Image: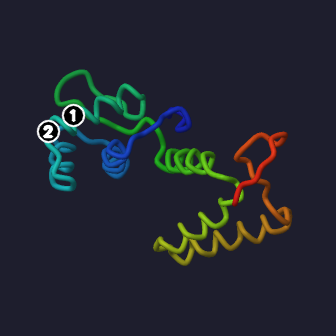
Amino acid sequence: MIDAKEVTISDSEWEVMRAIWTLKRVTSHELIGLMDKARGWSESTTKTLLNRLIKKNAVQKIGTGRPFSYAPAVGEQDSMTAAANDLFDHMCAMQAGTTLANVIESRDLSQDDIKNLQQILAQKAKTAPEMVECNCLPKDVKQDCDC
């Protein structure tokens, strides 16, 4: 599998990847039908997105003759983690906790998910700083932000 950190997936490409991850292996005909049903996308839209994902090495074409099959070349969880880390890398470090809390509040979580989060937070609490430093500007630049 390709390192998910090396693949940037657009919003529309995520929709195609979710279908490919779920099915594990799919033909273009099947994918076109699914994307039409799920999103109302035309054949050309789905083919364009699929070809972009192949060029990005997120999807691999399997077979030597038609019909080709397509399978994920990047892991789903790795891709989600890379995308989330990338998003958090673009925001003030002081806002990460509040943002995570807001995300958690807005999502349905299983009992196991909640137990896992509680364990992670209990472990992190042992070494957490009193306050996270702002990372909006270099440390040698005077910061007067409302972070």
| Quadrant for the C terminus in the image | bottom right
User: Who's the residue at 21% across and 48% down the image?
Assistant: 35
Count of numbered circles on the image: 2
Q: Position of residue 11 (x, y in %)?
A: 37, 46
Instruction: Determine the CA span between mark 1 and mark 2.
Output: 6 Å
Amino acid type, mark 1: Lys
- Name the one closer to the observer, 88 or 65: 88
- Residue 90 vs residue 123: left or right? left
Residue where numbered disc 2 is placed: 43
Q: Position of residue 50 (x, y in %)?
A: 28, 34
Amino acid type, mark 2: Glu
Q: Is residue 67 above or below residue 107?
A: above
Q: Position of residue 4 (x, y in %)?
A: 52, 38
**CB-based contact (under 8 Å), mark 1 and mark 2:** yes
Q: Secondary structure at mark 2?
A: helix
Q: Position of residue 95 (x, y in %)?
A: 66, 60
User: Who's the residue at 62% across and 51% down the image?
Assistant: 91
- Residue 118 vs residue 54: left or right? right
Question: Quadrant of residue 47 in the image?
Answer: top left
- Name the one closer to the observer, 138 or 44: 138
Q: How is the image coloured?
A: rainbow
Disc 2: CA contacts within 10 A as few (<14), some (14-19) or many (>=20): some
The residue lying furthest to the top in this view is 64
Disc 1: CA contacts within 10 A as few (<14), some (14-19) or many (>=20): some
- Residue 17 vs residue 6: left or right? left
User: Who's the residue at 53% across and 32% down the image?
Assistant: 6
Residue where numbered disc 1 is placed: 47
